[in-house]
Image (tube, coloured by chain):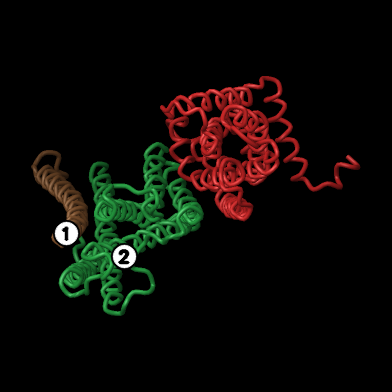
């Protein structure tokens, strides 16, 4: 009881929730493995989907990567509350005195982690599949954009999956709600990636897109804080 | 000249048409409300007629 | 039995007079604007007759944003007060906003065909952004119809707020993407319009604004009437 009292309660709650989600995921590895496989299959489909015999899709690297990440994000976000739903734990959590914001933060952090793990695979694979030319020097920049975008995805995704949770055709509704809001993130992510790989190699472009993503994250953070309570009200 | 004007006319025609269609849709809703009013009036008349019959009158 | 009190009460609740007044204002302004744009406004030197599309195209675009802003504010007010009237305003504003956004896309597409020979150009930021906007707000109705009654209004209000935050983000990201590729500004009729054109643009803007308010009021009257009727039917059936 002695050392625990010094930390504010919400950090303990947050840590507890995150630990719960991660422990569940580590046990089954369902979500992350599915996300990675889905991403790789999608990248493969992309190559054939273009319909050309073109072997060099370097200039499309940004677009290919981010379209794939967008759909993978929908998959991952859709799994946000699955554990709670399947074990009917959600009611228990809602009744408990955990502030909704802490719940939001826990879910969002989990999504950031899942997306990051997925990108650890996707970013190199994209380079191997599609890029003819220099790529591995720019990986750091791509990783940075991806990290910021993950925060954007996590914030908006958690909000929309919270809404979708209570709808009838949950798995159908989530993409319809989430993807239009994700479009700016995809535009910026693909633009920034394109700026460093296969494109004009313009760092000011890259910076512009990254700043935009930061703005997106801030705006959605504010919206989430303002509305997340109302999602779980009763 | 006439080519360009064709497009302008088309654009404004679309605007007018869609707005009008929207107003017509609102009008259909009003008609539905009107039908409901008629149904309620009939219901009221029926109830008035029932309470007027000599059966079950209090003394 | 009471007649005068119900009349007075219903007039207050239904509010049909406001709808009538705005309907008249809107009709007058839209007619004036249409006539003016076609017959009075001077022709553009560069684009010719096609430029006339922009008067209504841009006016409708701006008013659709107003509509979504109204929906957002009404959503916030609903979440605060839980008064049904704010949900009425919110859902109606979204519906009209979508109507206007679709009009923006159609008129923009016609302009694209007239100027570039194709029905769609990805390089026109307004066209692309309004496509995203329509997708965002069409989802509003998908959400609304798949949530059960106890949560429907609350979730609609939340989405009206979130959607409105997505709008400037979409605008800005599309614009940023365009500016790196096409430094040329695609939209005509910027702030450098000569006064003879500017005045007709402002009249068009006023006309579209009045149209929005009129449509809003008329639909609100319809919703309030329907609700009052439902309540009445229930009372009658239970008596």
Residue placed under numbered mark 2 in the picture: C59
Task: Tell me the colour chain A is drawn in.
Answer: red
Is residue B18 toward the left or the right of residue A188 in the image?
left
**Which of the chains is green?**
C
Secondary structure, mark 1, is helix
Q: Chain of mark 2?
A: C
> Taking A169 as reference, is A211 above or below it?
below
Nearer to the camera, A132 or C100: A132
Position of C225 compared to C192: left or right? Answer: left
Picture quarter containing residue A51? top left
> Hey, which quadrant is residue C19 in on the image?
bottom left
Residues at marks 1 and 2, CA–CA distance in whole angstroms: 17 Å
Q: Residues within 10 Å of mark 1 (few under 14, many from 20)?
A: some
The chain containing the residue under callout 1 comes to B
How crowded is the residue under tag 2: few (<14 C-alpha within 10 Å), some, or many (20+)? many
Residue in the picture at 26% in, 79% down: C196
Q: Position of residue A212 (x, y in %)?
A: 58, 54
Residue B9 numbered mark, or none: 1
Chain letter of the brown region: B
Front residue of A48 and A226: A48
């Amino acid at each position: 009881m002695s050392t625990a009292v010094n930390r504010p309660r919400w950090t303990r709650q947050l840590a507890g929730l995150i630990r719960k989600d991660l422990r569940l995921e580590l046990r089954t590895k369902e979500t992350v493995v599915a996300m990675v496989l889905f991403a790789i299959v999608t990248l493969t489909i992309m190559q054939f989907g273009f319909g050309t015999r073109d072997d060099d899709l370097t200039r499309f690297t940004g677009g290919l990567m981010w379209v794939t990440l967008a759909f993978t994000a929908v998959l991952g976000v859709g799994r946000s509350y699955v554990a709670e739903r399947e074990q009917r734990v959600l009611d228990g959590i809602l009744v408990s005195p955990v502030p909704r914001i802490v719940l939001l933060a826990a879910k969002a952090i989990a999504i950031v982690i899942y997306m990051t793990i997925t990108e650890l695979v996707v970013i190199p694979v994209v380079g191997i599949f599609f890029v003819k030319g220099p790529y591995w020097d720019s990986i750091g920049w791509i990783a940075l954009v991806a990290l910021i975008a993950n925060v954007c995805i996590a914030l908006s995704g958690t909000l929309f999956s919270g809404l979708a949770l209570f709808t009838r055709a949950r798995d159908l509704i989530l993409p319809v709600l989430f993807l239009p809001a994700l479009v700016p993130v995809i535009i910026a992510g693909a633009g920034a990636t394109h700026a460093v790989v296969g494109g004009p190699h313009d760092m000011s472009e890259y910076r512009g897109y990254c700043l935009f993503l930061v703005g997106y994250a801030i705006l959605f953070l504010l919206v989430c804080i303002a509305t997340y309570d109302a999602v779980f009200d009763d | 000249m006439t080519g360009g004007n064709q497009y302008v006319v088309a654009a404004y025609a679309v605007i007018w048409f869609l707005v009008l269609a929207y107003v017509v849709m609102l009008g259909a809703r009003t008609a539905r409300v009107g039908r409901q009013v008629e149904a309620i009036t009939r219901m009221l008349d029926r109830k008035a007629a029932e309470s007027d019959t000599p059966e079950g009158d209090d003394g | 039995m009471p007649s005068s009190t119900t009349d007075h009460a219903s007039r207050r609740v239904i509010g049909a007079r406001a709808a009538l007044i705005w309907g008249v204002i809107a009709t007058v302004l839209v007619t004036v604007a249409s006539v003016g744009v076609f017959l009075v406004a001077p022709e553009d030197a560069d684009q010719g007759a096609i430029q006339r599309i922009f008067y209504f195209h841009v006016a409708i675009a701006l008013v659709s944003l107003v509509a979504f802003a109204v929906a957002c504010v009404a959503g916030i007010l609903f979440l605060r007060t839980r008064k049904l009237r704010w949900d009425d305003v919110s859902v109606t504003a979204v519906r009209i906003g979508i109507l206007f956004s679709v009009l923006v896309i159609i008129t923009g597409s016609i302009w694209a065909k007239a100027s570039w020979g194709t029905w769609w150009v990805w390089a026109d930021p307004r066209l692309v952004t309004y496509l995203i906007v329509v997708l965002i707000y069409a989802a509003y109705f998908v959400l609304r119809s798949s949530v059960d009654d106890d949560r429907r209004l609350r979730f609609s209000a939340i989405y009206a707020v979130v959607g409105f935050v997505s709008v400037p983000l979409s605008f800005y990201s599309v614009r940023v993407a365009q500016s790196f590729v096409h430094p040329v500004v695609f939209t005509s009729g910027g702030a450098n319009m000569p006064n003879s054109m500017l005045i007709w643009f402002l009249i068009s803007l006023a006309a579209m604004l009045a149209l929005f308010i009129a449509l809003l009021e008329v639909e609100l009257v319809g919703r309030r009437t329907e609700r009052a009727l439902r309540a009445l039917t229930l009372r009658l059936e239970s008596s």
